[in-house]
Image: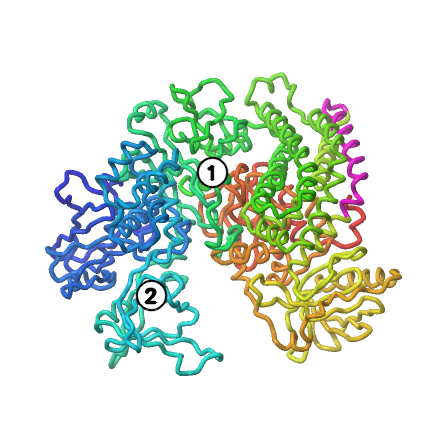
Amino acid sequence: MVEPADRPSTAGQRLGAPESFGVSTLEPGLRPPAQPPGRQVSIRVQMLDDTQEVFQISQRSPGKVLFDLVCVHLNLTEGDYFGLEYQDQRKMTVWLDLLKPTLKQIRRPKNTILRFVVKFFPPDHTQLMEELTRYFFALQIKRDLACGRLICNDTSAALMVSHIIQSEIGDFDETQSWQHLLHNKYLPDQDAIRDKITDCHRKHVGQTPAESDFQLLEIARRLEMYGVRLHPAKDREGTKLSLAVAHTGVLVFQGYTKINAFNWSKIRKLSFKRKRFLIKLRADPAQNAHHDTLEFAMASRDCCKIFWKICVEYHAFFRLFEEPKPKPKPILFTRGSSFRFSGRTQKQIIDYVKDSELKKVPFERKHSKILSNSSMSPQPASFRSQVPKENAISIPLVDQADSAQTGHQAESNGIEELPLVTASANGFQDIPAALGSGPIQSRQNHHVSGSAPEQQLLNPGSPASDDSPLGSPHVIVNGSGSVNGQGIGCTGVLGPGQSPEGRQLSPLTSPLLTEAGYVRNDDEDEARRKKFPTDKAYFIAKELLTTERTYLKDLQVITESFQSFVGKDEVLPDSVKNLISANYDPVYKFHQGFLKEVEQRLAQWEGRSNAHIKGDYQRIGDILLKNIQGLRQLTIHLQKHSECLVELERACRSSRKVETVCRDFEQQRVCYLPFNIFLLRPLHRLLHYKLILERLCKHYPPTHEDFRDCRAALADISEMVLQLQGAMMKMENFQKLLELKKDLTGIDNLAIHGREFIRLGCLSKLSGKGLQQRMFFLFSDSLVYTSRGMTPSNQFKVHGQLSLYGMTIRESEEEWGVPHSFTLFGQRQSVVVAASCASEMERWVEDIRMAIDLAEQSSSPSTDLLSTSLPDNKLLEDSGAEQESEEELCSSRSSLERQGHRGNTTVHVCWHRNTSVSMVDFSVAVENQLSGNLLRKFKNSNGWQKLWVVFTNFSLFFYKSHQDDYPLASLPLLGYSVTVPCESENIHKDYVFKLHFKSHVYYFRSESEYTFERWMEVIRSATCSTSHSTRKDLY
């Protein structure tokens, strides 16, 4: 099928492709379509690495056959981002139409060379899920730089070329780098910035070719000319312009400067008439009607048609969910073009790779002198971090023989993210920071698993990782025992997992990589599980370990991330900075030691040493008792944490700069929750210790050797909780008021002494226009109703306030004929509202009546919450508010990515899911935090993916491993239901629970009956509201 062009080996063999056809990019899971009978014709295609291949196709084959053959030949799964271009008889560069016969487009195939190039440039390179795809994109960027198409400043150009050189020759060597630049031309004016290039290259030590590709694409995607192909045109005045198309819409350039952009949402129709290209915009009331159509003159009708076609294809690829269906053939005559986009859309590509079990295919980089053996499998974009940390093994060629002596397949050590976040139709939210809205975080923030000195290195024969009986494969990192230039501490003797030179194998803690291309063997899973303890006490102790890891990461947000962030600008007062440092650093250092002890004990308990044979280490009470007694010495610091929260808020109120810095920090990926929640974590952790000890004491018989230590530790921690309980409840309420203040606009003095938050949620308010969705906030002295505003931060606009003093409430379903409705009679006005269901109405009525009683007992009158600058309430009522659908909350990127944390708060989730949450629910959620490994499966997928999952703040946060600094995706659980799969769903596994909301369905699988029950318990606490009368029993 493929013949070499003046070479003994094919590109497929060079890239490590199997001889079989593999996967067709246009028909997922199938072989390339059968070719129609007829004479075979040779077509020559030039690849992105400048090699040429000859393909044999039938003379009647459509372009799709040739394109499929090229993609299969390259083992390219995400081939739909690419296309085949050529010069036609008019010397114009055009794209091969996949639906038309190839030979009707290429008149002289013997004299024509088609070029395989990138056709669709996505806005974010993290949407490219295969390393091979990113490699081809990097080659395209390299080509665009060399031909002067990708215009940028010298600094960006030097940085991009330095990453290209790093991927080709490896770490900086002055002589080698200089010679390489002399013999290779990467830029038209390369000599002028050669010194800049070498200076940048010095900084990339330890960076693999895969990382270099990633960084190259990260820089390129931020450039104005990224992916831009200019088409000359003129406006009505004859001014020379250029038109281009991008994922966002149609762009207008003057020279190399973008002067206008027309978003797809604003464009009503694109057309051309002779040499005129027409853009018809949607009607805008603010503009005159004659501005509705824009006209550009191009060189010829053919130029118009070529640009119109690529616009149609760009629109379909990035905006449609699936390939458009062909138009029915007219009976009598045709009108307009029958041209349509052919191939998978971007959403279809992402969904296909996410749901498919694709094999890991190694490939060779033609221009690289570094051996790069890719083993990265495709994975969902919503589960990738910002930078791929070793998606390929990188070993100098001289070390190749040594590395081969290990006898183990090299695996990738984690790569990079669902939106948040941002979620595709699956509902997962990719995580923080607006899409492309911030610079790449420093490499220090992207730890590779295994880089910590205390990381225990496992032998290949070990049944599992240090925290899961499910096991994980291994990886050789850089072939030199270091990760990105950082040494890895050695904690054991040389074993089969190390090379003779002492190079160590790091455990691969990236479940996304292993699961996407690896189907688990049930017998193998069962065998691994049996090697681990089955005692319930072991799983309780393991819960202590997993939650302690998450807790330490949360403390790290305060002690490291926040302090380094505010230290850059030095706007935070020294008194506040010192107060936080003095009272959180000692707690962080203490828990570092505590975590090490727990990790060592669990390793001994699991049998990773000979100690378990004697049975001396199958307990956890002694460690808990020792450390809780040590924690009591830190009580003075814990008591100061409420003061830290108050002082930080006071500093924000007194200085706009401090408020801005704190708000900017909350946009960082590492701050996945409102920062004030992190400040209360040490107090909340005391509750977790108490609950764990209660479960241990309940499990152990009084005669058990661990019972006495657990009971003594429980007594100590209960005393601490009792001592700090008052401050804890006050600070929780204060923190909640501060968080709500950020979500509301038009309100003054929300967080005042004596005011308590009770419930927030969605109700329908009856007005002259009928029932309108409103967000209600119930406090101990007033009821405020709002609607979602159109501000950039998606804050809720206040419509009105009802004082609870003297208020009465009456059910009015029969009076108004509205189900689940009730009327609130205030002193100045009455409001009729309706809940979404009977249980929701019952909760609101109960809490409002309780709040009325509290207001009656209070001697002080209620404070007016409304800002004096708030517009007239009636005008607000009539104006309406932009509403965002549930699909927007569960879209291909997270609301966190679009609007920072303000787009994914509990308030917004309640708005979209039409539900409510009380302060009791928040307190229960604080108590029911949980962490651990779970296997996740989508509704229509076959394989299970291993993820590190954290439940907190009514959401599940997903990580590749517990060592990640920030979550890659989140799933708000309010409104979801948790059940056990039924027989018809064919989930024949143990310990599986199901999460579903409307059409969104996920399955999660735990490792034991205990962990299954715990996950069900904590998730139900987030999906089922709690009665307010139970609050007194929480602590």
Find out whether the residues at labels 1 and 2 contact each other: C-beta distance under 8 Å. no
Give the side of residue 270 with respect to residue 980, left or right. Answer: left
Amino acid type assigned to the residue bearing label 2 in the image: Phe
Provide the residue designation for mark 2: 253
**Residue 24 locus on image (x, y percent):** 30, 51
Using the image, tell me which numbered label, if any, was put on residue 422. none
Which of these two is toward me, 70 or 857?
857
**Residue 58 locus on image (x, y percent):** 16, 56
Q: Which residues are magenta?
A: 703-729
Name the residue located 37 percent from the left edge and 28 percent from the top edge.
Answer: 479
The residue tagged with tag 2: helix, strand or loop? Answer: strand
Give the side of residue 339 with respect to residue 439, left or right. Answer: left
Is 119 in the magenta? no
Amino acid type assigned to the residue bearing label 1 in the image: Ser
Give the side of residue 52 with respect to residue 308, left or right. Answer: left
**Residue 425 locus on image (x, y percent):** 48, 57
Is 707 in the magenta? yes
Provide the residue designation for mark 1: 510
Neighbour tally class for label 1: few under 14, some 14-19, many 20 plus, Cα within 10 Å: many
Neighbour tally class for label 2: few under 14, some 14-19, many 20 plus, Cα within 10 Å: many
- Secondary structure mostly seen in the magenta stretch: helix
Choose top left, top right, bottom left or bottom right for residue 83. bottom left
Rendered view: 453 above or below 417 = above
> Which quarter shows the C terminus?
top right
Name the residue located 36 percent from the left edge and 66 percent from the top edge.
Answer: 251
User: Which residue extends farthest bottom?
Assistant: 289
Rendered view: 310 above or below 201 = below
